[in-house]
Amino acid sequence: MNQPTKIPATATILIGGESKRFGSPKWQAIIDGIKLIDRTWDLCEIFENRFVVGKEKPDSISYPFIKDELDLKAPINGIYTALKYSKTDWVFLLSCDLPLMTNEIIQSIWTAGNHDADALVPMVNEYFQPTCAFYHKRTLNQIPRRIEDGDLSLHGLLNSINTETVIMDEIEKEFTNMNTRGDYEKILLERK
């Protein structure tokens, strides 16, 4: 049986958030007996390359790790770091707090998107999903400008570049973001 072709991009798993609302590092949360960091790592096996980005490398993570390049507390730091260190033109940014994401969804974003764009971003009910999206290296030059303007949001970045959206309203649940313990408990209950 032939191995499917890997997506020619570098997967970057973000673990950099402080997890204040969650109470502990979200990447350590366990769903279906697997730590979210391990589940997310395995989910990204469809890419040519993959690494983890965060503020500091936790001792318990053995995956290739790159420390955030900038001294900022914002996801734009993760995408800047990913784009700077990626050896591929495309980077797939995935936050580890999207526990219901699937390989099929990631593949469909890549397949449906226009590769002449600067970013391929799923949109669910008119909201960008910027931490589950593809970014081209061309985007790297735009980030310092956003920071200089004081706009650290990924939404601001997406509005300032050539962003191709992929409408995914029908699978809203898979984009559930696990921000709080309540979110976590709800996900665990639904999976029983």
Image (cartoon, helix red, strand yellow):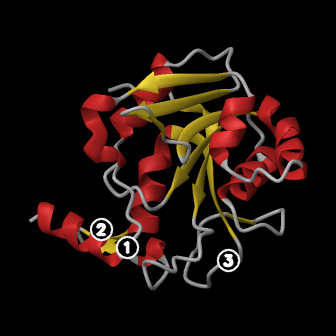
Residue 13 percent across, percent down from the top left: 57, 56
* Dot label at residue 180: 1
Seen from the viewer's position, the closer of residues 146 and 81 is 146
Q: Secondary structure at mark 3?
A: loop
Amino acid under disc 1? Thr
Query: Is 86 drawn above or below residue 122 in the view shown?
Result: below
Q: Residue at (84%, 37%) from the top-left corner? A: 142
Tell me if label 3 and label 1 are in contact, CB under 8 Å: no
Residue identified by numbered label 2 = 183
Residue 175 percent across, percent down from the top left: 36, 46
Q: Earlier in the sequence, mark 3 or mark 1?
A: 3
Q: Quadrant of the N terminus?
A: top left
Residue 15 percent across, percent down from the top left: 57, 67
Query: Is 183 drawn above or below residue 145 in the view shown?
Result: below
Q: Nearer the viewer, mark 3 or mark 1?
A: 1
Amino acid under disc 3? Lys
Seen from the viewer's position, the closer of residues 69 and 180 is 180
Amino acid under disc 2? Asp
Asked if residue 4 can be seen in this view, the reply is no
Residue identified by numbered label 3 = 57
Q: Secondary structure at mark 2?
A: helix
Residue 148 percent across, percent down from the top left: 90, 50
Mark 1 crowdedness (10 Å alpha carbons): few <14, some 14-19, many ≥20: some
